[in-house]
Every structure is written in structure tokens, then in C-alpha cells.
Image (cartoon, rainbow, N blue to C red):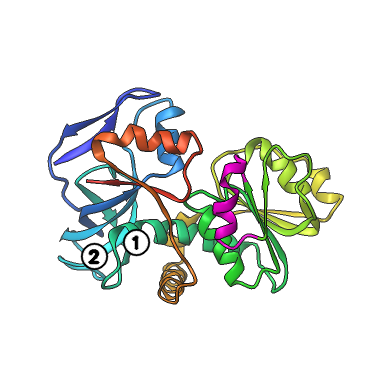
Amino acid sequence: MRRVRCESRGGPLFVEEAPLPEPGPGELLVRAEAIGVTLPAVRKVTEAAEPGPLGGEIAGEVTAVGEGVTRFGTGDRVTGLCSGHGYADFAVLHEALASPVPEGVSPLDAVALVRGGLVALGALEAARPRPGEAALVTAAASGVGHLAVQLARTRGAGRVVGAVSDPAKADFVRGLGADHVITYSDDTWGTPVDYVLDAVGGELLAPALAALAPEGRLVAYGSGGGTIQAYDLLVGAKSVIGFQMARIARGKPELYEQWCAELWRLFAAGELRPVVHGQFALEDAAKAHGEIEGRSNLGKVALIP
């Protein structure tokens, strides 16, 4: 089979022939039909001290199962997160991180909806939204952010603000249901909001925190890092909450499945629309990464084996 590798920091990415992996206990072997490109995978190439497998979101057909697998069988269509070599014709998923794909749903819709949607929905749940509250979503045009904007609206947000890196993305984000769109470089981020869903971190933490009304909540779910001064929290009685999807998948499987069902319900009802920005061959993985690095994507970037 083919797979994409990176042998040194910064690349290049190249396709090589590799043996077909075997699923271990609790694992599924999946023939990939679509592979989601994520910012963490891009950062493995650009920032990691040592090269490692490029994991990712996979949608495809189960071709073999390991010992102890009870939820899936050969021929089932699934989507989930691969922590090993995910940029490949075949990938191994742990059963706990896999979800069934309903009949008739395309692999592109599945890979764009489920993992990104779970992160967006989980971050929204962590914010404890109340009907009528105002929400702000950073990276609002990203693979996760564009779903978070829509989910905030379905949860009854009275006002949804999208924050983006480039004003050229404004029409796209408004089309998702945002009432207002601001850019990171704006002097002010407008009327304060009740909660922020932040995927960016770093230098954006300060303006994101400042955008909160008193007693507002900021949910950090990205890997951008950053530092917050305690006084900035005390002065407005504000809260910062961290969210990581893997902890839910491995520690609260019932909640994980409940959230998956909610995503598929909203998708079937037409209330949640995943958008695929672009499709790239495995050989063009570097170009796919370039879309993420350049912050040019509107929605999900995917590889098609």
C-alpha cells in the first residue's frame, strides 16, 4: 500500500510503499476513502523536533478487525481518528475512536463532519451555553470552526460572531449563520460576548479574553498554547476551560456516541452542513498542508487515496 511520510522537520512529504498494517487488540483496519487534514498533523511536519507518523481523520470501509472488537465487523463503513499512519491507503483505528457512517453518506461528508463536529460540539458543551447568549468562534472558517458557528446557532445563540484571519473569508462565515465577522487585527472585537470557542490561542488569547462580558467563558480547544494573566480573569470573573476530545472518546464512550448521534441527526435535518474546501491526492499532501498553513481554507481539507 501507499503512505505519506516525513523524515525531517519541515518536510518534504513523500509517498512510499509500505506493508499492509495488521489491527491489534481493539483495533480496526480501514481502507481509506477520505482522509481529513488537521492542523495538528501539519504541525507535526513544521514544528515537531522528530518526525513521526502523520495521523488524521479517516473515513472508509473496515477490512479486518483485531481481537476483542465488538462494535464493528468487516464491510462496515466507519470514520474516526488514526494516531498512527493515517495518510495511507489503509489505516488502523482504535475501536473507541471509530464511529459508524450512516447508509448513503459520502466519505467526504463523514470525514468533514464527525471528528471536527465532535470537537466543535464538545467545546460548545464545555462552554455551558444558555439560550440567547452571544458566542464568538475563532478560526471560524476552519474545518472545526465552520461547524462550531453552525452548532452555536442550533443551540440557541442570540448572536454569533466569527473571527477570521482574512476579511475575504467573511462572506463564507456569514453564509454559515454568523451575524458578524471580525478579523484578528481589528482594534476592537465589538460588543462583548458570553462565551468564546477558541482554536487559535497564542497571541489571540488576550483579545479573545477581552471580548468576553463579565462572567464570560473561554473554551480553549486548539494546540496553539499561550499565557493568560490571572488578574485578567479576576477583574471580570471570567473563566478559561480546556477541552480535549480524546479524553471524552476514551473516558466517556457513552457521551461520545451520544454526540455522534446528535451530529448525524443535525446533518440529516439539514441543520449542520460540513463544507469541503479541497480534495488532494496522497501525492499532493504537501499542497493540502499548504492550504492549512496559509490559512486559505474555507472548511475541510481532505486527501483522497
Magenta stretch prevailing secondary structure: helix
Check disc 1 and report the residue beneath it. 110
Query: Is disc 2 surrounded by few (<14), some (14 to 19) or many (20+) residues within 10 Å?
Result: many
Q: Name the side, left or right, on which 10 lies relative to 189.
A: left
Which residues, given as a range, are shown in magenta?
A: 164-178
Vertical comparison of 92 with 148: above or below: above
Based on the displayed image, in which of its 4 quarters is residue 126 positioned? bottom right
Q: Give the residue pinned by disc 2.
A: 77
Q: Is residue 12 or residue 229 the one in the foreground?
A: 12
> Which type of secondary structure does the marked residue at label 2 adopt?
strand
- Residue 261 occupies which quadrant of the picture? bottom left
| Figure check: 249 above or below 226 | below
Is 267 displayed left or right of 102 in the figure? right
Residue 153 placed where, x, y %? 61, 68
Q: Residue at x 26, y 60 (%)?
A: 26
Q: Earlier in the sequence, mark 1 or mark 2?
A: 2
**In the image, which is nearer the foreground, mark 1 or mark 2?**
1
Q: Amino acid at mark 1?
A: Ala
Q: Is residue 247 magenta?
A: no
In the picture, the quarter occupied by the N terminus is: top left
Query: Which of the two residues, 262 or 185, is positioned nearer the viewer here?
Result: 185
Badge 1, how many Cα within 10 Å: few under 14, some, many 20+?
many
Residue found at x 49% / y 39%: 296
